[in-house]
Image: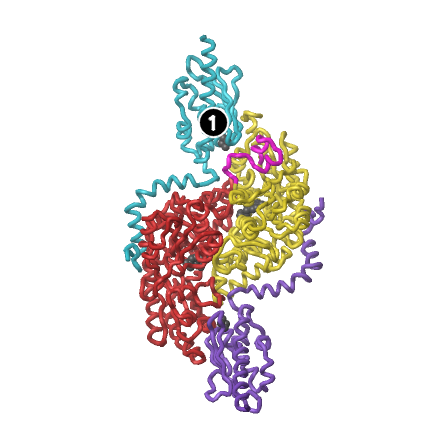
Chain colours: A cyan, B purple, C yellow, D red
Amino acid sequence: MGEKNIVLCASQTDVIMKTDNHDWKKAYAPAAQHELEEHQGPVLFYNEIVIDHFTNPRNVGEIPDADGYALVGDPSCGDQMKLWIKVENGIITDIKFKSFGCPGAIATSSMATTLALAKPIAAAKQLTDDDVISALGGIPENKRHCSLMGIAALHAAIRDYETKHACFAA
Amino acid sequence: MGEKNIVLCASQTDVIMKTDNHDWKKAYAPAAQHELEEHQGPVLFYNEIVIDHFTNPRNVGEIPDADGYALVGDPSCGDQMKLWIKVENGIITDIKFKSFGCPGAIATSSMATTLALAKPIAAAKQLTDDDVISALGGIPENKRHCSLMGIAALHAAIRDYETKHACFAA
Amino acid sequence: MPMIYLDHNATTPLDPRVLKTMLPFFKKSFGNPSSYHRHGREAREALEKARHTVAHLLGAMPREIVFTSSATEANNLALRGVVRALRNKGRHIITSSIEHHAVLKTCRALEQDGCQITFLPVDGCGRVDPNTVSRAIRRDTILITIMYAHNETGVIQPISDISRIARSHNIIFHTDAVQAFGKIPIPPARELCDLMSLSSHKIYGPKGAGALYIKRGTPISPLLTGGHHEHGLRAGTENVPAIVGFAAAAEHAVKDCGKEAVRLAALRNRLEALLIDSVPDISINGKGVERIPNTTNVSFLSVESESVLLHLDLLGICASAGSACTTGDPEPSHVLLAMGCTPQQAQGAVRFSLGKSTTARDIDTVAAVLTDIVKKLRSISSVA
Amino acid sequence: MPMIYLDHNATTPLDPRVLKTMLPFFKKSFGNPSSYHRHGREAREALEKARHTVAHLLGAMPREIVFTSSATEANNLALRGVVRALRNKGRHIITSSIEHHAVLKTCRALEQDGCQITFLPVDGCGRVDPNTVSRAIRRDTILITIMYAHNETGVIQPISDISRIARSHNIIFHTDAVQAFGKIPIPPARELCDLMSLSSHKIYGPKGAGALYIKRGTPISPLLTGGHHEHGLRAGTENVPAIVGFAAAAEHAVKDCGKEAVRLAALRNRLEALLIDSVPDISINGKGVERIPNTTNVSFLSVESESVLLHLDLLGICASAGSACTTGDPEPSHVLLAMGCTPQQAQGAVRFSLGKSTTARDIDTVAAVLTDIVKKLRSISSVA
Ligand SMILES: Cc1ncc(COP(=O)(O)O)c(C=O)c1O
Ligand SMILES: Cc1ncc(COP(=O)(O)O)c(C=O)c1O
Ligand code: FES
Ligand code: FES
């Protein structure tokens, strides 16, 4: 009757172990880990680097005579940030931001500005939110969207700089 | 705005007491008691008299030369009982029963036979299941139907006796 | 680090006295209330005693109390149960736009199943105007469901007026009284409504228990079918320890309610006064009207609530933004938006819900700390 | 009076080790898993750890586990959830005539809502013939639900065969594994089925927790709507202590399962042998086929089970007739009737379900006592 899987009175451990050895570990363990993280749910487990950048955000402020400026908002949450850059010889010599946003937004913006500072424009343009997140040592899954804001602002400020620069050149 | 009932920061006890004094006790307490009994649910709270009649049922047995006999069953549960009576000078001088039934059925049958024994036929015919239940000091609500069996058997046995008796007289 | 817990509307610590009443039902009296033996009887007796207690406190009959696993389940049973029982009578439901998600999302689901729902607006203080209820009533209205007191703002609805309107139209009236019961005096259930939801873990009882009051005769179908538990209205082996604990917690809550309400209202008002004093540009949502005494909802302009909360959390202070079960939603509270807050005001809203453990000192600490946090966040805010 | 508890299929005593794992979540870590602060995080961490544990034991991914308040709720979620999700695909369900009421009554309710249900018969041992499953499949069959092991008889269904049939037709397969999990080894969930129901209080865990395994990708709608709990499939503040206890109990059950199964099977067999020896005219329902090791269902001819139970109870012995949730039903067990028992045989059926506390001495006592009880009841029986 095909009941081979169900061995009455056999040790459960056998089955579980078999499971472990064969498919479970291979097929499920990595996924499971990922799933766990994804499903830590709405309560956020920020790591220490993130907390540090949130409580002591770097490069906060404004640059009155900035070379590039951007205001970006996240339509999903209504949060927004402003970012200013100063560029000398193609290098970002100063960068400042202000943020009306969640801890994820503040920390990622802080890290984004840190990464961009002293970088050539070309290099700064290559920065992605993944760079920011990995520099922070990770961020909760449902806060990934926040990290986009800092990067988007950086890129927008660079575009702003380039547009103005292009104008001057023209 | 008709919020008189909701007095912020007033004592809850007031409201509860008001409830007690006014309608609650009058309107609800007796019903509530009844409801509680009814809703002790499937688990049965038999009293000591019932337990006694269940563990030591009176008048168990058969009467081979009975004057009246009946076999009745409860269609809802499939339980059944048999009852025999011996009648002398219009008086039930002996009564015996056998029961394939639940504790309620056994105890009520035992009590029914106890009540009928030594009674004139006329008086025995007046016995009701309420008499049986009150003699037992009550029975769980969902066991009331069981008490019908003993009484039904008694009445049927009397009818049986009367039919035979009528035949003889004819 | 000292802990200050100001999130009692999300959940409360279990009263140690309540835990004590529960323990025997984990240990010696572990029986299934439906079992035919002494262990069953013990459990059954405890269950029915708990039902009696809750019924008495509500001004109801024991038979009118159905225990559920949570208020969410009670709300679902109320709404889905009435809709199913009356499906041949009508499909229109009236509710408000600020209900708890357990009602709101259930209404949305019922909409997909063919019901029509009127979501009533609220005024700037978060109250439903009873006249809008009257006007929304149709011939096929089968149910009005309006919460008693709001979990986010604490605002109390004109529930007696709405009740009267429902009754005069012979329409079933349900109220989610989770945040009202045990915090303020409430009229006897049978005078107020046909259905009322309660939750245990909001009143220092255990998680895993809730109740629905169902007035005798109210047409309702079960949500969970199976054994004959709970008068056939809620199948599943009863969670006896939790139900026993719920009843004990309810008794304590009602008994302590008067004194505690006065005490908490004073502390809450103190918190509000301190914040108004020391933090510029705040608004207190729902302040104009009657609220449950333990709750305040404060919008700090130009800052984002999650950032406030994380700063508080790092200092050992627990508060929340909106209801716990929308934590992680990036959108601002549907409740504050419905009250006419700007998205920015809504984004900066923090709920402080006080409770038994709250002291005046806690309040002073929190006010002081908040002053600094908000100053700091505003200094980096792009909209300040 | 010494107590002998042989009603473990109704509910089990809570393992003291399990209670210990629960207590912190009543006390210090009382938070709402959705709250944005340390208390919330603690609770959330415990919840997800419990999910991980249960998933691992089942051979599933954490995301595939939804915690419910009971197996009844899990069964309802499985059946009603699939029906709702697939309502545009079909309305035919295949089940057996011997399912637990949580499935059977839910099927009846769904029938009223327009579903068509095939209730498969069973053989004299209480097993579904897989061929009847094949034959019952229609183009609009959306779900097959067959329980794993029976609560009344202990009989194990040819579940792998049925699973294979369901899979080969691409039909969702649910199994109520309440009485199998932790008692016998079961194949990894993902290899066996799409949906599987579990209950905590049957494996020495607390009441108030159950689980539904939902294979990734299975179409299903929630039963309880509200907050975003349990991946949106089951709203309501999670009963953290109960869920933590459930996971701990599941771990113990699986770990001890091998040894305990051997021990209980020996005791159960001893009870049966003793009864066969000393009590004439009995039959053991389902004896011919594989059963879970702790359960025996004995029909004592010519006596009524409730009378046997009360005698046992008066002597401190706890057993049951059929499942706990049909206690009080006057009708004989639908399960035994479906197996071809006469009504009289069914009326005389008593279930003994053994467990951790059961000793050989208990078994000897019960057998001896039963011999007397049955003799006594037969002496007054009208059908003996
Ligand atoms: C007003 C209101 N209704 C319903 C609920 C849901 O209660 P429970 O967590 O018992 O499902 C809550 C709390 O979350 C609430 O505040
Ligand atoms: C096979 C089976 N399914 C479902 C249930 C219901 O379990 P719960 O009591 O957790 O609702 C039980 C126990 O009563 C059972 O034995
Ligand atoms: S939630 Fe808006 S940026 Fe993080
Ligand atoms: S249940 Fe049949 S007579 Fe009592």
Check mark 1 vs ligand 3: CB closer than 8 Å? yes or no: yes
The residue segment tinted magenta is C326-349
| Image location (x, y in percent) of residue D273 | 32, 71
Image quadrant in which the C terminus of chain D is located: bottom left
In the structure shown, which secondary structural element does the residue marked by tag 1 occupy?
helix
User: Which one is in front, C279 or C98?
Assistant: C98
Taking the image as shown, residue C293 lies to the left or right of residue C28, namely right
Query: At label 1, which amino acid type do we have?
Result: Met
For mark 1, does the 10 Å Cα neighbourhood hold few (<14), some (14 to 19), or many (20 or more) residues?
Answer: many
Q: Please, which residue is most extreme toward the front here? A: B170
Q: Does C338 appear in magenta?
A: yes
| Image location (x, y in percent) of residue C376 | 55, 29
Q: How many marks?
A: 1
Q: Does C25 appear in magenta?
A: no
Query: Which chain contains the residue that carries disc 1?
Result: A
Query: Residue at image x 53%, y 91%?
Result: B168
| Image location (x, y in percent) of residue A38 | 42, 39
| Image location (x, y in percent) of residue B88 | 55, 91
Q: Which residue is mark 1?
A: A149
